């Protein structure tokens, strides 16, 4: 796997999980690493009671004429897409805006 200076062409493993912060209050955390085993070890060591589903594998697309603003070297989490299961009652308040 090639590792470009900005991370393009490099494969990453991501995981979205939730931590309970209080009664009916959770924080969603998206964690990323280049090595799936490292992410699995981290989750089991730092968050032993956390249930998580599956890892997300992704790469950044290499673009020909890329600038800092146009090349797309970021991940944008979109929580407003249609869901299979109902999300009624959930309120999402990002710590940073935009959530990138």
Image: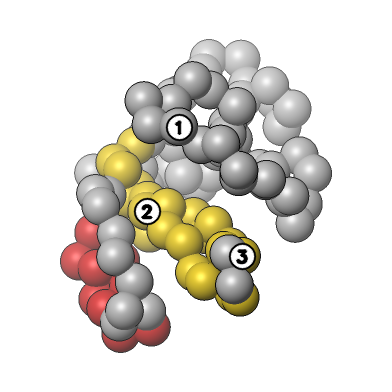
Observer-nearest of 43 and 20: 20
Q: Residue furthest top?
A: 64
Question: Closer to us: mark 2 or mark 3?
Answer: 3
Closest to the observer: 53 or 39?
Answer: 53
> Residue 12's spot in the image, x, y percent?
34, 48
- Determine contact: label 2, label 3, CB under 8 Å: no
Residue at 34%, 71% (x, y): give it.
50
Disc 1 crowd rating (10 Å Cα; few below 14, some 14-19, many 20+) is few
- Residue 86: which numbered mark, if any? 1
What crowding class fits label 3: few (fewer than 14 Cα within 10 Å), some (14-19), or many (20 or more)?
few
Element marked by disc 3? strand
Q: What residue is pinned by disc 3?
A: 25
Q: Which circle's residue, 2 or 1, is located before the other in the chain?
A: 2
Q: Distance between the residues labelled 2 and 3?
A: 20 Å
Residue position for label 2? 15
User: From the viewer's perspective, is 9 left or right of 55?
Assistant: right
Question: Dot 2 lies on which element?
Answer: strand
Query: Quarter-wise, where is residue 25 in the image?
Result: bottom right
Residue at 24% from the left image edge and 49% from the top image edge: 54
Instruction: Point out residue 1 in the picture as x, y percentages from the top left corner.
Output: 23, 44
Residue 99 spot, x, y in % from top left = 69, 43
Closest to the observer: 60 or 4?
60
As measured in the structure, the alpha-carbon distance from the residue carrying label 2 to the one carrying label 1 is 21 Å
Tell me what residue is drawn at x 73 percent, y 50 percent: 93
Question: Is residue 32 visible in this depiction of the protein?
Answer: no
In the image, residue 5 sits, relative to residue 26, either above or below, namely above
């Amino acid at each position: 796997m090639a590792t470009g200076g900005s991370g393009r062409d490099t494969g990453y493993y991501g995981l979205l999980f939730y931590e309970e912060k209080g009664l009916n209050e959770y924080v969603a955390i998206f964690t990323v690493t280049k090595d799936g085993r490292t992410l699995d070890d981290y989750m089991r060591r730092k968050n032993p009671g956390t249930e998580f589903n599956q890892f997300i594998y992704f790469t950044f697309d290499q673009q020909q004429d890329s600038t800092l603003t146009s090349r797309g070297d970021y991940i944008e989490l979109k929580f407003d897409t249609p869901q299979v299961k109902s999300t009624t009652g959930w309120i999402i308040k990002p710590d940073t805006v935009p959530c990138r």
